[in-house]
Amino acid sequence: MIILQGNKLERSFSGEVLFDNITIQVAQHDRIALVGPNGAGKSTLLKILVGEERASAGSIDKKRDLSLSYLAQNSRLDSSKTIFDEMLHVFEDLRKDEERLRHMEMKMGEVEAVELEDLMHTYDKLSEDFRQRGGFTYENEIKAILNGFKFDETMWSMRIADLSSGQNTRLALAKMLLEKPELLVLDEPTNHLDIETIAWLENYLTHYQGALIIVSHDRYFLDKVTTVTLDLTKHSLDRYIGNYSHFMDQKAQKLLAAEKLFEKQQKEISKLEDFVQRNIVRASTTKRAQSRRKQLEKMERLEKPEGYAKSADMTFKADKPSGNEVLNLTDAAIGYDGISLSGPINADVKKLDALAIVGPNGIGKSTLIKSIVGLLPFIQGEVKYGANVQMGYYDQTQSSLTPGNTVLEELWSAFPTKLELDIRNCLGAFLFSGDDVQKTVNMLSGGEKARLLLAKLSMENNNLLS
């Protein structure tokens, strides 16, 4: 059964077409991965499908009373409730029925005969409906999902307003899973999850009863969860049966076949054009040349197949080397407002070291990085920087970008003494070429913003990157 359908969808910005001719069908148990290069419009297409944006052309048809939940990359819960109370709100109807059942139980001791018989009949009917809808298990469901997302019992009484942005997004996803909509639309759901939580989510979604549409850069996550892959390009949405790995194999075969057809047609065109050019002026062969010319005019020309997306040429170099001792942490503690998240932390970073900081959600990985680069103070302990250390920092919130700037202005304003050619060369290395550099920052996808931030970082020529 089809629960959602998009027909001939198009989205344009200021006259520039992002995508067009997009047709999509979602059946009630589909598990769809929506893929495509950065900037193709994946997040925009999701917003159109769920009704958060309007298409420039085309139409959306949905099943009557379709229940749908949508997790955007920046989804947040705006609530004054505690974590557990917000989750309880999902089951408000069940809780009302529960109160009604308790009231009926008390009333049974006050009535007799026919009235009691009618009351017990109504009670049995409501009680069975309550059971089938999960009335006796919903609190256990809440606890299981909160624990799955690393909200243990000590956090259940926390106010949502006191959560970090990453925790809030995780809680928004947890609430959606409890709602169990017929269609769950997820845009980068693993962004704020650690490895253990991603594994838990993979298992949960594998057994999810409704339909899924997922955008994710985590190919292993898509391989585990999805069974259909939709490949978004500027003028089409191609459907492949199978997970992401199967899609890559099928696309490679399709691309190879298309290239062979294109090359075959190009040879035929070249042969016909050569015949026309050599014979059009000869009286004896003019008619045959004119026939070949008509054949060329009627021929439906194949477009050159687009290969795989180019890879960014990300080059980072230092203006000057640091000393052998780069960074030393001694008995450091990190946190906010005097409250420690982790500590004591001891580290000795040497020149040319490449370190990964791992740990569960909420342990303070980002806080540690911010403390090292000086954006947050250490709660206690000592930090020493080596000689000639120049630090560069990639901010995952992307808050340092100016929305109204074009891509070119964003980079050039940070390095005003550089030649325009140098700025454009750097942008080209990070896959911003041609008209791309005139896009405003607020028009960029999350992946494009990430590339722009990395381009800025590459031009700083630091010798310590965080």
Image (cartoon, helix red, strand yellow):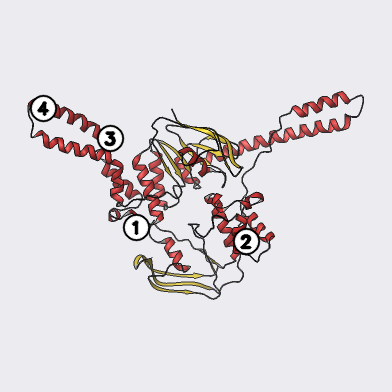
Q: Is residue 272 left or right of residue 450?
A: right
Residue that label 4 marks: 115
Q: Earlier in the sequence, mark 4 or mark 1?
A: 4
Which residue shows up at 49% across the image and 47% down it?
Answer: 218
Residue that label 1 marks: 162
Q: Earlier in the sequence, mark 3 or mark 4?
A: 4
Q: For mark 3, give the secondary structure.
A: loop
Q: Is residue 217 left or right of residue 275?
A: left
Mark 3: amino acid: Arg
Q: Nearer the viewer, residue 238 or 294?
A: 294
Q: Residues within 10 Å of mark 2 (few under 14, many from 20)?
A: some
Please say if the residues under marks 1 and 3 sit with CB atoms less than 8 Å apart: no
CA gap, disc 1 to disc 3? Answer: 32 Å
Mark 2: amino acid: Trp
Q: Nearer the viewer, residue 3 or 435?
A: 435
Residue placed furthest toward the bottom:
387
